[in-house]
Image (cartoon, rainbow, N blue to C red):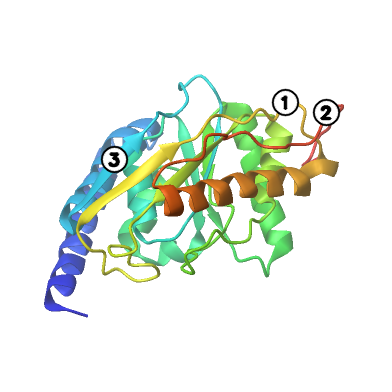
């Protein structure tokens, strides 16, 4: 690891530590109730600040859904950069699913707790994961908040779109909230993958058209998951071969059927 990388990492940790303390100081007199302010203003500033330290510029194409529209955001996940770019977006009324491992990084643990992240566990603990998703489903149903999840569940550094887990699509089936795919295009030359040695440059983030889930049912979860993954694969292949998204961004989802509860 180069000296410049070590310096950026040290600056990132100091910046995140100071930022998390400031957020905590603000949260105490507000009785920890101003989640949207912590997330959409303070955490957004932290994410943007980390990208600035790394020399990463974020170019956004499209826009998130209006705040009154409950939305499930999903994206590909190939880099450490993704987390800070997502936070820097300040997605309106949006909660996040993140790996519980990140809680061990104290500044991230403080920030995550204040913005009410749903901390997940690995796939090897299916019962605990079901409990986490049931709780999230209940909270999101009560609050109408939007949510972000990574269907890949981990950083995929092969240069391809990874396997998609079913959790995001169970949640979409239960809430019948539209899914908005977010495609990250990160040049290989600047992508740190699993590491932290991000090179300066510009990443492109695309909000793809919303996907209607009002007719989705539990029986079709795997088919709908595969249809959304296929969209990401087509977008990924088109960006690599042509430098732009494909002309068609529709998906072949399951036919309309009677609604049912998923997490009952």
- Does 124 sit above or below residue 90? below
At x 35% / y 50%, what residue is drawn? Answer: 111
- Does 61 sit above or below residue 106? above
Front residue (pair 226, 118): 226
**Residue contact at pointers 1 and 2, CB within 8 angstroms:** yes
**Percent position of residue 208, x then y:** 50, 34
At x 34% / y 45%, what residue is drawn? Answer: 204
**Mark 2 vs 3, N-terminal side:** 3
Numbered tag placed on residue 159 in the rendering: none
Tell me the distance, in whole angstroms, between the alpha carbons under discs 1 and 3.
31 Å
Which element carries disc 2, helix, strand or loop?
loop
**Percent position of residue 98, x then y:** 49, 54
Left or right relative to 198: residue 218? right
**Percent position of residue 132, x then y:** 64, 51
Quarter holding the C terminus is top right
Which element carries disc 3, helix, strand or loop?
strand
Numbered tag placed on residue 259 in the rendering: 2
Residue that carries the numbered disc 1 in the rendered image: 214
At x 70% / y 52%, what residue is drawn? Answer: 166
Residue that carries the numbered disc 3 in the rendered image: 59
Q: Where is residue 28, by image quadrant? A: top left
Q: Where is residue 197, by image quadrant? A: bottom left
- Would you say residue 94 is visible in this rendering? yes
Residue sitting at the far bottom: 1
At x 64% / y 30%, what residue is drawn? Answer: 141
């Amino acid at each position: 690891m180069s000296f410049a990388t070590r310096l950026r990492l040290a600056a990132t940790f100091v910046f995140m530590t100071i930022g998390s303390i400031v957020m905590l100081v603000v949260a105490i007199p507000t009785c920890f109730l101003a989640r949207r302010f912590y997330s959409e203003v303070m955490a957004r500033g932290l994410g943007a600040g980390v990208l600035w330290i790394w020399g990463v510029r974020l170019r956004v194409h499209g826009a998130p859904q209006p705040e009154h529209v409950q939305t499930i955001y999903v994206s590909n996940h190939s880099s450490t950069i993704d987390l800070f770019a997502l936070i820097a977006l300040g997605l309106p009324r949006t909660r996040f699913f993140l790996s519980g491992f990140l809680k061990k990084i104290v500044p991230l643990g403080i920030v995550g707790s204040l913005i009410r992240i749903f901390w997940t566990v690995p796939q090897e603990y299916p019962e605990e994961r079901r409990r986490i998703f049931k709780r999230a489903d209940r909270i999101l149903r009560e609050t109408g908040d939007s949510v972000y999840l990574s269907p890949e569940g981990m950083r995929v550094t092969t240069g391809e779109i990874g396997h998609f887990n079913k959790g995001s699509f169970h949640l979409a089936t239960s809430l019948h909230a539209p899914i908005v795919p977010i495609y990250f295009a990160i040049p290989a030359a600047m992508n740190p993958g699993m590491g932290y040695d991000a090179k300066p440059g510009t990443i492109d983030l695309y909000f793809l058209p919303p996907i209607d889930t009002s007719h989705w049912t539990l029986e079709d979860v795997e088919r709908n998951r595969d249809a959304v993954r296929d969209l990401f694969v087509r977008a990924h292949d088109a960006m690599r071969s042509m430098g732009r998204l494909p002309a068609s961004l529709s998906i072949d989802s399951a036919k309309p059927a009677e609604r049912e509860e998923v997490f009952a």
